[in-house]
Image (cartoon, helix red, strand yellow):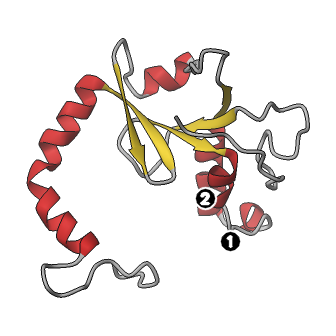
Amino acid sequence: MLESDTAPAGPGLPGFGDPNVPPNTFFLTIPPAHELCLALYRRSDFARLFLGVKPEACFVDRGVQAYMRVVVGRSRLVCCDKQGRLYLPPPLREECGIHQEVLVIGAWDHVEIWDVERWQRYLESHREDIPELAARIHGSAGTGGGIDPGNPKN
């Protein structure tokens, strides 16, 4: 289970810095650069997505403005109930094609919630890419290489 946190305020993001938001609150969003799934973030991890974005950029850069509208506009604060369950709002479920069965996977700093059939299609479409991606991420055998997070060419 993803542990919640008590993140400090994040500029312009709903739920940050609000003392009335319970500590078991998460951000549920549809990541714009991902396949259609739901992504569940702790508040601090969600805020980290926006580190480096200057608030004034939202007023002068249409691309930044569009990105912020899409990400924040499709995000909802959600809480676990006493049994640890999450309510998935219908508009987000519908956009991701989530109907009955879901699959929950860990994805580094967040959890992804997939419709089971959509996940199977995703796996099938990426099955052949996995060995090459693994080599890029972990480095080829014997090279000690891998993706350098500081290199934008990765």
Location of the C terminus by quadrant is bottom left
Classify 15 as above or below 80: below
- The residue depicted at 59 percent of the width and 46 percent of the height is 71
Instruction: Report x, y in % for residue 108.
Output: 45, 54
- Asked whether residue 75 appears in the rendered view, the answer is no
Say which element carries label 1. Answer: loop
Residue 1 placement, left or right of 55: left
- The residue most toward the top is 100
Residue 101 placement, left or right of 2: left
- The residue depicted at 12 percent of the width and 79 percent of the height is 141
Tell me where residue 129 sits by quadrant. Answer: bottom left
Residue 49: image tag: 2
Q: Could you give the CA–CA distance between mark 1 and mark 2, rounded to whole angstroms?
A: 9 Å
Classify 131 as above or below 94: below
Instruction: Report x, y in % for residue 87.
Output: 58, 18
Please name the residue that numbered disc 1 is placed on: 52
Q: Residues within 10 Å of mark 1 (few under 14, many from 20)?
A: few
- Asked whether residue 22 appears in the rendered view, the answer is yes
Give the residue type at disc 2.
Leu
